Image (tube, rainbow, N blue to C red):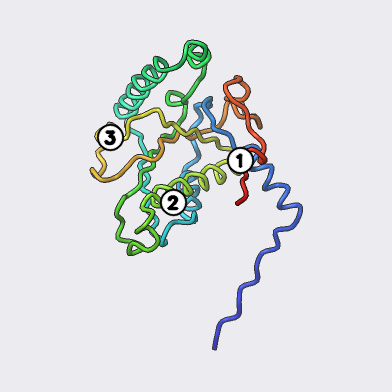
């Protein structure tokens, strides 16, 4: 006898409005308070992150919590080196603005989390990625986005640091050689919550309307 189908939740108009608010208030946070996260909160958020879709149900994401002060110092030094190189590559009219941007909360954020992708997980038996192996990394990005939204529901902010060399990070964090860094995340309570992206407030860039990115064929 077949089990009865589970009823689908009713995501009503009120829920949809709150969901839109969640998307609007999800920000890339660079300015954190130093208060620690409550015990068990990160683990609860990561449980939710693992509900993200993944190609072939491979769950190729690998989370590394970085607590050791010496490793954190090494990560900050790597960021500073890479950021200096990025500054030097800016055009003359952009360099001053770039130098004024705060691009990471590595010093203030109470929690550091590195997210890697395993490029050849046994789980999933390779389904769906023969022609597009990069979908493994996309799956890890989906987990980060899910974590980002889940964190915001708890009043917690997340900042994605990408100004790092993946091959250097593998050595600093002593992870398996084949893993590939997808993002280094700063997590904590925002010092300045805002519903406008910081880069937009700093006049670095602005959002473009859907009409500019939607095409028909």
Quadrant of the drawing holding the N terminus: bottom right
What is the CA distance from the residue labelled 2 to the residue labelled 3? Answer: 20 Å
Looking at marks 1 and 2 on the same chain, the residue that comes earlier in the sequence is marked by 2
Looking at marks 3 and 1 on the same chain, the residue that comes earlier in the sequence is marked by 3
Residue 62, compared with residue 207, is above or below; it is: below
What is the CA distance from the residue labelled 1 to the residue labelled 2? Answer: 23 Å
79 lies left or right of 92: left
**What residue does disc 1 label?**
213
Q: Which mark is residue 202?
A: none
Give the structural element (helix, strand or loop) at label 3: helix
82 lies left or right of 111: left
**What residue does disc 3 label?**
167
What is the CA distance from the residue labelled 3 to the residue labelled 1? Answer: 33 Å
216 lies left or right of 172: right
Crowding near the residue tagged with mark 3, few <14, some 14–19, many ≥20 C-alpha atoms within 10 Å: few
Image marks 2 and 3: residues in contact by CB distance under 8 Å: no
Q: Which mark is residue 139?
A: 2
The residue sitting at 70% across, 58% down in the picture is 11
């Amino acid at each position: 006898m077949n089990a009865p189908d589970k009823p689908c939740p009713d995501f009503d108009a009120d829920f949809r409005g709150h969901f839109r608010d969640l998307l609007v208030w999800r920000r890339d946070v660079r300015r954190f308070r130093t208060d620690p996260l409550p015990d068990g909160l990160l683990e609860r958020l990561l449980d939710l992150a693992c509900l993200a879709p993944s190609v072939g149900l491979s769950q190729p994401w690998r989370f590394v919590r970085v607590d050791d002060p010496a490793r954190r110092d090494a990560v900050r030094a790597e960021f500073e080196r890479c950021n200096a190189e990025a500054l030097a590559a800016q055009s003359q009219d952009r360099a001053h603005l770039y130098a004024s941007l705060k691009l990471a909360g590595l010093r203030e954020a109470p929690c550091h989390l590195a997210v890697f992708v395993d490029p050849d997980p046994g789980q999933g038996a390779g389904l769906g990625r023969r022609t597009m192996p990069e979908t493994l990394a996309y799956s890890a990005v989906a987990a980060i986005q899910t974590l980002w939204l889940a964190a915001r529901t708890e009043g917690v902010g997340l900042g994605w640091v990408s100004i790092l060399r993946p091959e250097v990070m593998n050595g600093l964090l002593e992870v398996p050689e084949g893993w590939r860094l997808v993002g280094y995340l700063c997590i904590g309570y925002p010092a300045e919550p805002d519903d406008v992206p910081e880069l937009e407030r700093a006049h670095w860039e602005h959002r473009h309307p859907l009409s500019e990115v939607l095409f028909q064929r």
